[in-house]
Each structure stands twice: as C-alpha cells, then as structure tokens.
Image (cartoon, grey):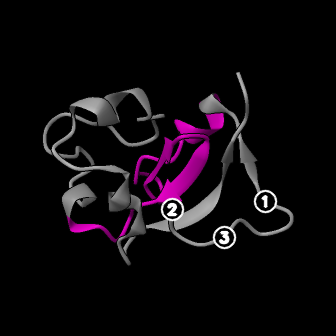
Amino acid sequence: MNESPPEEERVFTEPQLRLYIGERGYPIYIAYAGVVYDVTRCPKWRRGLHENLHWPGQDLTAELVDAPHTADVFNHPCVKRVGRLAAK
C-alpha cells in the first residue's frame, strides 16, 4: 500500500477512528487491512460519503470485496497512511 510504516506508528481504536469523519476540524480517515489512511484530499471522499455507499471513520476491509476497484486504490497520491488499527 501507500508508504512504508514508520517505526513508531499511531494506533487507532475503532471508536477513535469514528471521530475522523471530516467534521469539527477532523480529517477524513478510513481503515483497510489494519492500516488507517487519510483520504481527506481524495475527490471521491470530499462530500464525506464515498460513492453513496461508504462512510468515513470506518474499517472498510470487508467492503472492498464488492468495490469496483482493488486495494491499489490506497496507492493514489491523495491517500496517506497515518497509522494502524488496533486489533479487535
């Protein structure tokens, strides 16, 4: 995916991830395969709801199966790795 993880990386719990929905000064974050990404600058996320299907602040790992794209979407320049999702 996009960028190698830094040696010490921020860990987000699912409740923390749910804060990052692009409101109240927070950027837009999503998680996929245990990695948290900032998608704030991605045009498809600018309105907060991606393709009228996916909400920000969520772990979208299970939903990628039904997406019209692959995990390569996380390599786009607008996507930035910001941490990892805590194990459940």
Indicate the amino acid at tag 1.
Glu
- Near mark 1 (Cα within 10 A), the count class, few <14, some 14-19 or many ≥20, is few
Indicate the amino acid at tag 2.
Met
Comes first in the chain, label 1 or label 2: 2
Q: Kindly state the secondary structure of the residue where label 1 is placed.
A: loop
Q: Is residue 43 above or below residue 57?
A: below
What residue span does the magenta drawing correspond to? 15-43
Residue 20 showing in the rendered view: yes
Residue placed at 32% from the left, 36% from the top?
64
Q: CA distance from mark 1 to mark 3?
A: 11 Å
Determine contact: label 1, label 2, CB under 8 Å: no
Per the rendering, the mark at residue 51 is: none
Nearer the observer, 27 or 79: 79
**Could you tell me residue 82's position as x and y percent?**
62, 62
Per the rendering, the mark at residue 1 is: 2
Per the rendering, the mark at residue 9 is: 1
